[in-house]
């Protein structure tokens, strides 16, 4: 089962490596990892998506919370959360395919970020499933490259 973990950490060198190592030490693969500043000064939010059992996750959360510079660890699946990813995807833009390609971009509520004589780069935010569906729809046009941000998430409603 997939779990979304939010780690609030102090902005210090090595804290991301220590958090990631705690997952590696337990042989847990990280499927998605996103890190950035938070609403608190000198504090960052690490959003991690992992696959694992509930008991394994609880032990990991306790261990991770005890690491130096970790302020708080929260299993967002317990209380519900809002999440999004960003994707930038560069696809072939053959003249005969442009109407269909633009239709896919519009229907999926994506935007054209860049365009040249051979390619269109689209950007879209959405859930993991929506991003995956968008990529699947673009595949027949010829995806040249894409980059996904990984999941960013916050708890839904008021945090206890």
Image (spheres, helix red, strand yellow):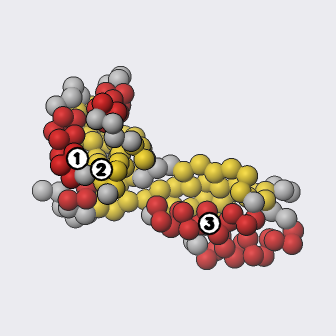
| Residue under label 1 | 57
Q: Secondary structure at mark 2?
A: loop
Q: How far, Cα to Cα, is label 1 from label 2? A: 7 Å
Q: Position of residue 39 (x, y in %)?
A: 30, 45
> In the image, what residue occupies the spot 43% across and 59% down?
84
Q: Position of residue 135 (x, y in %)?
A: 61, 62
Task: Pick whichever of labels 3 and 2 is earlier in the sequence.
Answer: 2
User: In the displayed structure, would residue 13 be above or below residue 74?
Assistant: above
Corner quadrant of residue 159? bottom left
User: In the displayed structure, would residue 144 be above or below residue 28?
Assistant: below
Q: How far, Cα to Cα, is label 3 from label 1? A: 31 Å
Q: Are the residues flagged by discs 3 and 2 in contact, CB closer than 8 Å? A: no
Q: Position of residue 10 (x, y in %)?
A: 27, 31
| Residue under label 3 | 136
| Residue under label 2 | 52
> In the image, what residue occupies the spot 16% across and 31% down?
66
- Residue 71 shows in this picture: no
- Residue 68 shows in this picture: yes
- Closer to us: mark 3 or mark 2? 2
Looking at the image, residue 123 sits to the left or right of residue 84; the answer is right
Query: Counting other residues with Cα less than 10 Å from the Cα at mark 1, is it few (<14), some (14-19), or many (20 or more)?
Result: some
Q: Secondary structure at mark 3?
A: helix
Q: Are the residues flagged by discs 1 and 2 in contact, CB closer than 8 Å? A: yes
Q: How far, Cα to Cα, is label 3 from label 2? A: 27 Å
Task: Pick whichever of labels 1 and 2 is earlier in the sequence.
Answer: 2
Query: Counting other residues with Cα less than 10 Å from the Cα at mark 2, is it few (<14), some (14-19), or many (20 or more)?
Result: few
> In the image, what residue occupies the spot 35% across and 22% down?
13
Disc number placed over residue 120 in the picture, else none: none
Residue, far top: 13
């Amino acid at each position: 089962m997939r779990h979304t973990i939010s780690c609030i950490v102090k902005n210090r060198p090595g804290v991301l490596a220590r958090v990631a190592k705690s997952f590696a030490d337990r042989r847990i693969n990280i499927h998605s990892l996103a890190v950035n500043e938070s609403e608190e000064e000198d504090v960052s939010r690490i959003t991690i998506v992992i696959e694992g059992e509930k008991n394994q996750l609880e032990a990991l959360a306790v261990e991770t919370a005890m690491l130096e510079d970790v302020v708080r660890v929260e299993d967002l699946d317990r209380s519900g959360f809002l999440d999004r990813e960003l994707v930038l995807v560069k696809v072939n833009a053959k003249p005969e395919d442009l109407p269909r390609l633009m239709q896919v971009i519009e229907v999926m509520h994506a935007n054209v970020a860049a365009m040249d004589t051979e390619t269109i780069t689209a950007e879209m935010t959405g859930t993991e499933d929506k991003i995956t569906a968008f990529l699947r729809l673009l595949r027949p046009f010829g995806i040249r490259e894409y980059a996904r941000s990984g999941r960013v998430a916050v708890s839904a409603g008021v945090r206890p």
